[in-house]
Amino acid sequence: MKRSFQIDMPKVETFNRDFVVAQATEVFHDKGYNATSMQDLVDATGLNRSSIYNSFGCKLHLYLDCLKAYQYKYQKKNSNVLLDATNAIEAIELLFNMYLEEMISHSNDRGCLIANCKSEMANHDDKITSFLNRDQKNTLDFLEDLVSRGQNQGDINTNKIASEYALYLFSSLQGFRMTGILVQDKDHLKSIIKTILQTLI
């Protein structure tokens, strides 16, 4: 009698993973993590619950994938800003203006997904906290390098060391995004950017 052997083939995803993450990101951005239900994610992605669990593990892991995709998107945008700038001050101004244009073009601006996550989820889960700490360090390193180059070139004053100005800019960027949720007056928002830049010159 022949014994039959069954080989477990790896599961192949039959959907566009990037599309699913993008659709889920919209839901999490609109509602936050806790208010987003699995049914919301099913409706947004077109996947059934079992497909979501099989592909992403759980709601939290899908959320982390959304955060990482959002982070990567803005890291690319930040890099492009540096390519377009002729000096550090111009780079910082372009960075703020990039967010300004996004806020103005979306009347229902929802702020930064990662900053929203920080206010809702920081210290509630080790994986989320670890992601937020890495993201903050990466952003601070990026800003510190930018300020340091500006100080070396004489475009940014040396009243404070680069790491202190980097923390100031990091806090300012997050506050700027939060302000833009309710304030849609472009002149008011530009005035905020001008005040921030004057601190550095």
Image: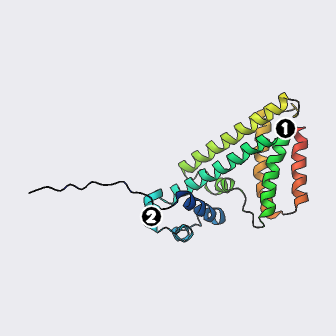
In the rendered image, the vertical position of residue 163 relative to residue 31, given as above or below:
above
Tell me if mark 1 has few (under 14), some (14-19) or many (20+) residues whose alpha carbon lies within 10 angstroms of its own. Answer: few
Which residue sits at x=62%, y=47%?
A: 132
Q: Please name the residue that numbered disc 1 is placed on.
A: 86
Which residue sits at x=85%, y=40%?
A: 89
Give yes or no for contact between labels 2 and 1 (Cβ–Cβ under 8 Å).
Answer: no
Question: Does 2 sit left or right of 167 as displayed?
Answer: left
Which residue sits at x=70%, y=56%?
A: 112
Which quadrant holds the N terminus?
bottom left
Of the two numbered discs 2 and 1 in the rendering, the one whose residue sits closer to the viewer:
1
Q: Earlier in the sequence, mark 2 or mark 1?
A: 2
Farthest residue to the top: give it. Answer: 152
Residue 143 in sight here: yes
Percent coordinates x, y for residue 156 in the rendering: 87, 34
Mark carried by residue 51:
2
Q: Nearer the viewer, residue 33 or 90?
A: 90
Tell me if mark 2 has few (under 14), some (14-19) or many (20+) residues whose alpha carbon lies within 10 angstroms of its own. Answer: some
Question: Does 79 sit left or right of 58 as displayed?
Answer: right
Helix, strand or loop status at disc 2: helix
In the rendered image, the vertical position of residue 89 relative to residue 21, given as above or below:
above
Which quadrant holds the C terminus?
top right
Q: Nearer the viewer, residue 12 or 114?
A: 12
Say which amino acid is labelled 1: Thr
Residue 33 in sight here: no
Percent coordinates x, y for residue 15 in the rendering: 49, 62
Helix, strand or loop status at disc 1: loop
Say which amino acid is labelled 2: Ser
Q: Nearer the viewer, residue 101 or 30?
A: 101
Mark carried by residue 101:
none
Percent coordinates x, y for residue 183 in the rendering: 83, 62
